[in-house]
Image: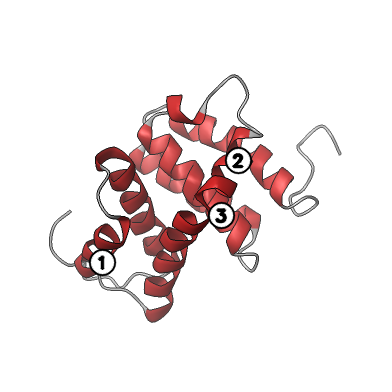
Amino acid sequence: MSGILERRGGRPKAREVALRVLYEVDLTGDDPREALALALGRFRFTAEGREHARRLVHGFLEEADRVDSALAGVLQHWELDRLGGVERALLRLAVTELLLEPGVPAAVVMEETLRLAHRYGDERSPAFVNGVLDAAARSIRPGELAPPEGRG
């Protein structure tokens, strides 16, 4: 996407921009703060959206070991570095938000992450991301999500 989007972005757009930054930095090794500044300049944001994007990217940078450790604890038969770049960025973004944004319900984090998985991943991404993220959310925020169907 080039140019400035006309619609002002709140938290959903902030997540999308943070995803793009995390993906780009993982792929290219670019400076994350510079990548974030460039990405923020491409979109119009609400003040809340701009700040949320910054918190997500900076939060991951500051807590990358903690985020990756939380993911490693729930990945079954997978290593984080073996995941596709989009899936890795999606999961890192969501776990960062789960860990650092307790005011955002886990169900919202999951729903928004799945929306992004449908948009940016391949046909298998949403199911994979959903399974890993469900386990991560239950581990990070025990009791917040309803029990899985059939286990209530």
The picture places residue 105, in percent across and down from the top left corner, at 64, 61
Residue displayed at 77% across by 48% down: 146
- What amino acid type should be assigned to the residue bearing mark 1? Ala
Quadrant in the picture for residue 54: bottom left
Q: Residue furthest right?
A: 152
- What amino acid type should be assigned to the residue bearing mark 3? Val
Quadrant in the picture for residue 119: top left
Q: Seen in the image, is 64 located left or right of residue 25?
A: right
Q: Residue furthest bottom?
A: 47
Of tags 2 and 1, the one toward the viewer is: 2
Q: Which residue is mark 3?
A: 109
Proximity of marks 1 and 3: CB atoms separated by less than 8 Å: no
Q: Which residue is mark 2?
A: 69
Going from the N terminus, do you reach mark 1 or mark 3 first?
Answer: 1
Quick check: 81 above or below 46? above
Quadrant in the picture for residue 144: bottom right
Mark 2 → mark 3, Cα distance in angstroms: 19 Å
Going from the N terminus, do you reach mark 2 or mark 1 first?
Answer: 1
Q: Which residue is mark 1?
A: 37
Mark 1 → mark 3, Cα distance in angstroms: 23 Å
